Image: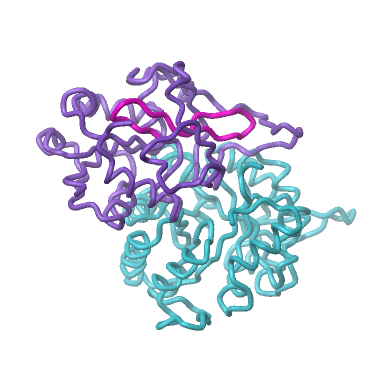
């Protein structure tokens, strides 16, 4: 026995409200991120991920306030991502109570941000989010490229090479989302998950596409992920975190029960 | 009655989680501070830490938090809880940042987990050691009250502690090596994991700390 594989519910938050809604049976307010995070905490989630999709700069104040409230009530690690552009943004979120901050597009525009922030705050709180899409080579070999703008804009950057570089710059963890699978419920893109987990020494969170509990299992056993992230299967009450953990444990995966 | 709990703030990272968790389990008053007067009046002291050891040690010394800590341990005789880099800072020396001298309050080393790191079956292990791992309790201690042996706590670290005096070992964790997860000496309890992020198990430990009289 040893380190458990982590299960991480993810909340997409816009102006302080969880979007897509969350369908717990006995919840008072299906859009309140604090209440929902507390519920996942009670269910035994290993961490909570808060993805801020607020577009306006006014909304950022709301985000900081929401993060503060979650941190006051939830005593498991909290990762905050979305719209993080500078060392100052990272400091703001850490001071609000985030344990880790996830950097996505800003790392592509300015990789030095990863080095600077890891040196300043420690690698343990710097997560680099990678949105990858499959773009096979001319000879048909699988290759994955980083896309921005919700998967619409190619960058020409190889996802595996990028993960290695980010780890070298000081990232403490990779949050890998397959843009081909995100929202499809067809399961993780296991090829890129395996390629990146094999290529880096730091932990990798698999994300994008979970529709069944078997997908969570595959992310760990086939993809080699250290943690699995999902939103909709938990939000809509299809499965609870304990059900997911029990299912994974039955299949020989070490989880925190 | 927990009395006043001082969380020593030497400017490295966010200490609100520790403070909120202590409040959540019923602390009468929590102050996050490096003010010598306040710390001298504290009934309990928490010595946390995140980030790189070199910067932490520099700030600890600059703000004279090392003197305040020694005073809390040996003059005030109040219960002291060290967390994560707070534990590492207590040791003699760390391999991090090319080698850094620490406080030497507990003789011992802070070592890199190694790269590559493998478990007993030859499986590769990721560094940092990040997530929930089982803590083996090596002795009874008031801070373990109500926490079963092999309970999982949340860890995040790339360097681990090895105390010279093995009789101080209160808990260990297996991750390629056997790392010291908790050390106990008199009124000091020091943990590598984050009780403030370890859900119910961590909150129980913090509650035990608030009720502890500093004897063991």
The answer to whether residue B63 shows anywhere in this view is no
Residue bounds of the magenta highlight: B172-190
In percent of width and height, residue A179 lies at 67, 66
Q: Left or right: where does residue B5 sit relative to residue A65? A: left
Foreground: B47 or A161? B47
In percent of width and height, residue B68 lies at 19, 28
In percent of width and height, residue B169 lies at 46, 26
Shown colour of chain A: cyan
Q: Left or right: where does residue A69 sit relative to residue A197? A: left
The C terminus of chain A sits in image quarter: bottom right
The N terminus of chain A sits in image quarter: top right
Shown colour of chain B: purple
User: Main structural element of the magenta stretch: helix, strand or loop?
Assistant: strand
User: Which residue occupies 50% across, 42% down?
Assistant: B155
Coloring scheme used: by chain
Asked if B52 appears above or below B133 in the picture, the reply is above
User: Which residue occupies 68% across, 44% down?
Assistant: A161
């Amino acid at each position: 026995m040893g380190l458990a594989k982590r299960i991480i519910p993810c909340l997409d938050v816009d102006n302080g409200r969880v979007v897509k809604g969350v369908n717990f049976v006995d919840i008072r307010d299906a859009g309140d991120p604090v209440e929902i995070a507390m519920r996942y905490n009670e269910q035994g989630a290993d961490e909570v991920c808060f993805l801020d999709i607020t577009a306006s700069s006014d909304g950022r104040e709301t985000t900081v306030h929401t993060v503060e409230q979650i941190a006051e009530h939830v005593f498991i690690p909290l990762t905050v991502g979305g719209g993080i552009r500078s060392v100052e943004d990272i400091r703001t979120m850490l001071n609000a109570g985030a344990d880790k901050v996830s950097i996505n597009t800003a790392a592509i525009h300015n990789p030095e941000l990863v080095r600077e922030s890891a040196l300043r705050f420690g690698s343990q709180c710097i997560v680099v989010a990678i949105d990858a899409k499959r773009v096979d080579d001319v000879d048909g070999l699988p290759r994955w490229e980083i896309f921005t703008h919700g998967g619409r804009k190619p960058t020409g950057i190889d996802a595996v090479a990028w993960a290695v570089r980010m780890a070298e710059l000081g990232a403490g963890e990779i949050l890998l989302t397959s843009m081909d699978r995100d929202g499809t419920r067809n399961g993780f893109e296991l090829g890129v998950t395996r390629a990146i987990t094999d290529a880096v020494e730091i932990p990798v969170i698999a994300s994008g596409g979970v529709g069944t509990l078997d997908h969570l299992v595959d992310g760990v056993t086939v993809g080699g992920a250290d943690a699995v992230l999902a939103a909709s299967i938990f939000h809509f009450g299809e499965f609870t975190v304990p059900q997911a953990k029990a299912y994974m444990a039955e299949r020989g995966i070490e989880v925190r029960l | 009655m927990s009395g006043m709990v001082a969380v020593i703030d030497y400017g490295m990272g966010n200490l609100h989680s520790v403070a909120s968790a202590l409040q959540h389990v019923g602390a009468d008053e929590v102050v996050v501070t490096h003010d010598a007067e306040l710390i001298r009046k504290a009934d309990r002291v928490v010595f946390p830490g995140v980030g790189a050891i070199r910067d932490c040690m520099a700030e600890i010394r600059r703000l004279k938090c090392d003197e305040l800590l020694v005073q809390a341990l040996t003059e005030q005789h109040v219960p002291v809880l060290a967390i994560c880099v707070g534990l590492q800072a207590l040791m003699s020396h760390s391999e991090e940042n090319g080698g850094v001298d620490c406080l030497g309050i507990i003789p011992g080393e802070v070592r890199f987990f190694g790269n590559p790191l493998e478990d007993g079956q030859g499986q590769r292990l990721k560094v940092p050691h990040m997530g929930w791992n089982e803590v083996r309790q090596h002795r009874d201690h008031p801070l373990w009250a109500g926490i079963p042996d092999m309970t999982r706590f949340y860890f995040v670290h790339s360097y681990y502690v090895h105390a010279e005096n093995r009789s101080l070992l209160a808990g260990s964790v297996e991750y390629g090596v056997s790392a010291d997860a908790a050390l106990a000496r008199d009124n000091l309890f020091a943990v590598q994991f984050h009780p403030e992020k370890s859900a119910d198990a961590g909150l129980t430990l913090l509650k035990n700390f608030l009720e502890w009289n500093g004897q063991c």
